[in-house]
Image (cartoon, rainbow, N blue to C red):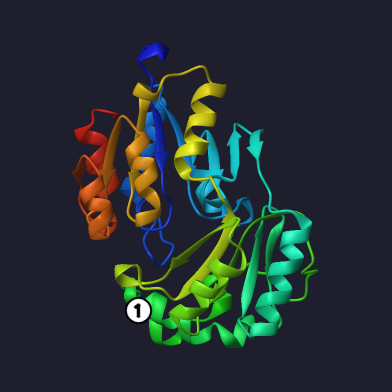
């Protein structure tokens, strides 16, 4: 395929490239590699920070990464953009969550750093999250299994943070966080139906779509060259920006409504079928 006809393909990770147990279907690997062989560029576009992109994902072969829901943009190991929470805000958030008794973890390209109470304090939420996503081992799921490389004794006052996630004891914790840090973007995430199990705080004005635009401009490409695949509400800005958008069959209803069309479930070769329908492979 001629280079000028190449597409920029943006892929959410959890529920799109891999299932909710972290397993990547062989058909997804086949689709990504075939698309790149056809001259297309493929980018992971995820809420995960770079530290959570484990070697299995890099080994598929991709052209770069949008991480932290848009705070970090990388093309072939070149950092295109990286916007961080200030050290002052990071300290303020850590102190506020600690005083409120909300277990949290800090999301950085240098690692995931857990509060002292996170392993025990997030155990129930992690099991509920795993069950809601259909994990067969949800009853025995642990924080360490969910985050195999999490650091439990690291420095918590940091200046390298993309975002911060924390356990919600109830929805009021999210509302109070939003009020306490009005200049930041507050969100929630969780299990089936995107139930609010965790809250998060990140820089305002950053989405997967703003990061996609930065990459498109960096590569001197056009918005008309973009394709997006995802499964959650956080992917809706990505769908709205992309020229063509596809929701996975396991998506929440909001994502399905926002996408151009819906492919099969991630565990039913949904990514491969989507690539084939769009003639990317």
Left or right, residue 153 beside residue 39? right
Residue at 24% of width from left, 28% of height from top? 279
Residue at 73% of width from left, 68% of height from top? 92
Q: Position of residue 134 (x, y in %)?
A: 31, 73
Q: Quadrant of residue 110?
A: bottom right
Left or right, residue 88 beside residue 169? right
Q: Which one is nearer the viewer's eye here, 67 or 30?
A: 67
Residue at 21% of width from left, 39% of height from top? 260
Q: Which one is nearer the viewer's eye here, 27 or 46?
A: 46
Quadrant the C terminus occupies: top left
**Residue at the disc numbered 1:** 131
Compared with 135, 248 (above or below) is above
**Res. 117 visible in picture:** no
Quadrant the N terminus occupies: top left
Q: How many neighbours does mark 1 have within 10 angstroms: few (below 14), some (14-19), or many (20 or more)?
A: some
Compared with 27, 193 (above or below) is below
Q: Quadrant of residue 191?
A: bottom left
Q: Position of residue 72 (x, y in %)?
A: 60, 43
Q: Which one is nearer the viewer's eye here, 185 or 2?
A: 185
Secondary structure of the residue carrying tag 1 is helix
Q: Quadrant of residue 144?
A: bottom right
């Amino acid at each position: 395929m001629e280079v000028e006809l190449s597409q920029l393909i943006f892929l959410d990770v959890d529920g799109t490239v891999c299932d909710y147990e972290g397993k990547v279907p062989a058909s997804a690997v086949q689709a990504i590699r075939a698309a790149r062989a056809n001259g297309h560029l493929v980018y992971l576009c995820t809420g995960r920070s770079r530290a959570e992109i484990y070697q299995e994902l890099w080994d598929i072969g991709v052209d770069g990464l949008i991480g932290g829901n848009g705070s970090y943009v990388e093309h072939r190991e070149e950092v295109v953009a990286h916007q961080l929470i200030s050290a002052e805000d990071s300290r303020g958030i850590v102190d506020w969550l600690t005083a409120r008794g909300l277990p949290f973890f800090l999301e950085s390209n240098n690692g995931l750093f857990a509060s002292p109470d996170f392993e025990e304090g997030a155990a129930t939420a992690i099991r509920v999250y795993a069950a809601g996503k259909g994990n067969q081992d949800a009853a025995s799921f642990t924080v360490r299994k969910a985050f195999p490389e999490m650091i439990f004794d690291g420095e918590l006052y940091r200046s390298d943070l993309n975002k911060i996630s924390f356990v919600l004891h109830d929805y009021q914790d999210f509302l109070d966080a939003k009020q306490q840090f009005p200049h930041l973007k507050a969100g929630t995430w969780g299990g089936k139906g995107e139930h609010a199990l965790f809250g998060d705080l990140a820089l305002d004005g950053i989405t997967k779509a703003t990061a996609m635009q930065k990459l498109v401009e960096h590569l001197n490409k056009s918005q008309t060259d973009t394709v997006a695949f995802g499964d959650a509400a956080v992917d809706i800005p990505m769908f709205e920006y992309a020229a063509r958008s596809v929701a996975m069959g396991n998506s929440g209803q909001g994502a399905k409504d926002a996408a151009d069309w819906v492919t099969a479930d991630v565990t039913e070769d949904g990514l491969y079928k989507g690539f084939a329908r769009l003639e990317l492979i």
